[in-house]
Image: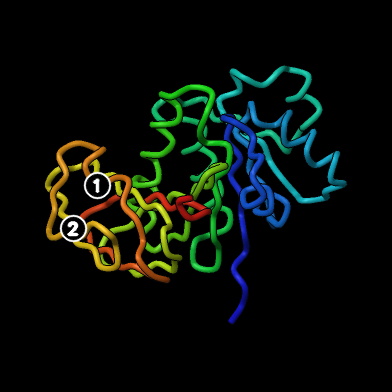
């Protein structure tokens, strides 16, 4: 089977420091920078000697004029304000690479401002709805987020910490393999299905609508 092309979307939050997101950035086939993430990406690729192709995309309000000039055709300005730069970057990436043989990793989407963090996390549910079947994860320095609906089994490890965030209280969740089981549970507030724990080397979730799942890199001490 042909290996999926790996596209990284680099947002303008905290630049990753953990080995997992840094490895994703270094191993990417192509990087799409939200405009104000460009300086940090340029610093990292210079330090690594990276020749990964990239573009910079956004509304341009956070990118100095000298950077726009230096980037030339590698800079794409999208002026509309209905969506943020992360959504603009993902829209460009999906239209350019498709989703059938591509996986997407979002980095730098948390930190700095909490409102940006919350907005970026909720976009995962939007992407899952807009692009059915898309393979997309958002990595932080502590773990990984994904969005899904239906039934899905995840590889895991004992004492891995798991949180499920539901945006619509009409969505019910059922779990197998978690310390605190969920049985057609309908959270009405975000915290109500968080801070669960994996018992073995996999767990299964069923959700009848989009949910956001967080999994830690390391087991609870």
Residue denoted by label 2: 182
Quarter of the figure with residue 5: bottom right
Q: State the residue in front, 188 or 76.
A: 188
Residue lying furthest bottom: 1
Structural crowding at the residue carrying mark 1, measured as other residues with C-alpha within 10 Å and reported as few (<14), some (14–19) or many (≥20): many
Q: Secondary structure at mark 2?
A: loop
Rendered position, 82 above or below 178: above
Instruction: Name the spot of residue 55 as percent of width and height, x first.
Output: 69, 41
Which residue: 60% across, 29% down? 77
Q: State the residue in front, 194 or 132.
A: 194
Residue denoted by label 1: 193
Instruction: Name the spot of residue 81 as percent of width and height, x first.
Output: 44, 24
Structural crowding at the residue carrying mark 2, measured as other residues with C-alpha within 10 Å and reported as few (<14), some (14–19) or many (≥20): some
Image quarter in which the N terminus is found: bottom right
Residue lying furthest front: 221
Quarter of the figure with residue 83: top left
Which residue: 54% across, 30% down? 78
196 left or right, relative to 110: left
179 left or right, relative to 187: right
Label 1 near label 2: C-beta < 8 Å? yes
Which residue: 83% across, 50% down? 51
Rendered position, 77 above or below 212: above
Q: CA distance from mark 2 to mark 1?
A: 8 Å
């Amino acid at each position: 089977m042909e290996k999926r092309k790996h596209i990284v979307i680099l947002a303008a939050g905290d630049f990753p420091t953990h080995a997992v997101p840094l490895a994703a950035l270094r191993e990417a086939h192509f990087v799409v920078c939200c405009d104000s993430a460009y300086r940090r990406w340029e610093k990292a690729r210079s330090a690594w000697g990276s020749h990964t192709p990239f573009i910079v995309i956004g509304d341009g309000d956070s990118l100095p004029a000298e950077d726009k000039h230096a980037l030339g055709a590698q800079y794409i300005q999208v002026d509309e304000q209905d969506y943020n730069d992360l959504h603009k970057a993902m829209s460009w990436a999906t239209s350019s690479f498709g989703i059938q043989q591509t996986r997407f990793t979002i980095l730098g989407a948390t930190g700095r401002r909490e409102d940006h963090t919350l907005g970026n996390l909720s976009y995962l549910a939007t992407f899952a709805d807009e692009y059915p079947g898309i393979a997309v994860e958002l990595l932080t320095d502590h773990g990984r987020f994904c969005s899904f609906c239906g039934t899905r089994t995840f590889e895991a490890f004992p004492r891995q910490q798991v949180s499920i965030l539901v945006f619509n209280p009409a969505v019910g969740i059922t779990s197998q393999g978690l310390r605190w089981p969920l049985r057609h549970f309908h959270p009405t507030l975000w915290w109500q299905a968080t801070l669960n724990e994996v018992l073995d080397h996999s767990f299964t979730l069923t959700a009848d609508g989009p949910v956001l799942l967080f999994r830690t890199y390391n087991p609870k001490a």
